[in-house]
Image (cartoon, rainbow, N blue to C red):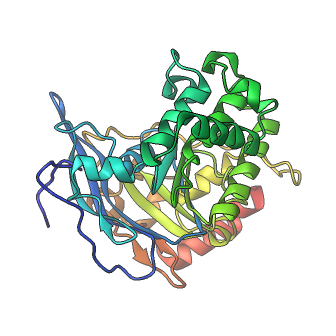
Amino acid sequence: MTEPQDLVTPQNTVQRIERGEAFLDVRDLKVHFPTDDGVVKSVDGISFRLERGKTLGIVGESGSGKSVTSLSIMGLHKAGTARISGEVFLDGQDLISASREEVRKLRGKRMAMIFQDPLSAMHPFYTVGHQIIEAYRVHNDVSKQVARKHAIAMLDRVGIPQPDKRVDAYPHQFSGGMRQRAMIAMALSCDPDLLIADEPTTALDVTVQAQILDLIRDLQREFNSAVIIITHDLGVVAELADDIQVMYAGRAIEYSTAEDIFDRPQHPYTWGLLGSMPRIDRERSDRLIPIKGTPPSLINVPPGCPFNPRCNYAHLNGGLSETERPELLDIGNGHQVACHLTPELRKQSWETDIKPKL
């Protein structure tokens, strides 16, 4: 294994390698932050593959490592503050060993990100149109007039009314939903091949939330982009994601198709996420059940299974959860889970204890 390193270093250049058909290939990615209190292991070895035209949902509570993963892919960690190891390939291009300038050229053109809070992500001193124009001209040799027409067209494409006038408005003059749409317009201004949406519907009402998700789906079909949706809410990715990766304490603890995650989840943490999700399609047999306790410190992750202190089923595995960390293993049909419970116990617990209450 290579020694941890910064995501981008000036002396390196982009290298191309063959990695099959996956457009994005992440292998054993680790992102650690040294602090005075110890090393924060924000991401501690995750792997996934994503093809163009497909959507991956990464779900988990705050602090599970979702956003750090996305920032690592985009090369947005400040040099010198993060120790990064592993492999990240975008269409065969090695991002880990790429120079800062090479990653900057890819960012916006080949890959783009919708940030969690558009009000803080967008500059308050410049109009929305100015920021979209600037992002477009960085990667396209066009005049300001041509870029302005493109910015207006993008604002219209994402459903902002009177785009020819709103292009000259400032971020604070937009509503929350309109700011999110403007952020999407900026991210898609150069038709990126990879779009990462980090909590794209946070703090939005359910009506606007549905509109934003429909918009991302429609634009993905138009541009054939690979999309990563990062969220703590399984409901957000219920119909949008093709595959779902569940993260906990910096690691992937379950990975499968969206259908399998919702119909046949295998990890007690995934059960907890489903149990705390409200349903509007049918009446529940019981009240919402929150996951007990709080996420662990990423400086002092509990020994064994990191979910052990919060797991209602840890007593069924003979004490393994307290001493041995479970590996992410394939249990068939590409469904992966990191849990010490036997397949029989997981099936019995799901069918008799969890599923009837959802």
Q: Is residue 330 visible?
A: yes
Residue at position x 64%, y 42% in the image: 150
Q: Is residue 353 visible?
A: no
Residue 241: x and y in percent read: 64, 62
Locate residue 227 relative to residue 66 in the image: left or right: right
Q: Residue at x 24, y 58 (%)?
A: 96
- Vertical arrangement, residue 312 with respect to residue 147, above or below: below
Which image quarter holds the C terminus?
Answer: bottom right
Taking depth in this image into account, of 336 and 93 the one nearest to the observer is 93
> Residue 169 at what x, y percent from top left?
67, 19
Looking at the rendered image, the quarter that the N terminus falls into is bottom left
- Quadrant in the picture for residue 106: bottom left
Q: Nearer the viewer, residue 223 or 273?
A: 223
Q: Name the side, left or right, on which 127 lies relative to 100.
A: right
Residue located 63% across and 62% down the image:
223
| Residue 349 in the image: above or below residue 169 | below
Residue 49 lies, in percent from the top left, at 44, 70
The number of discs equals 0
Q: Would you place residue 302 above or below residue 164 in this image?
A: below
Give coordinates of residue 63: x percent, y percent: 42, 39
Left or right of 54: which side holds 299?
A: left
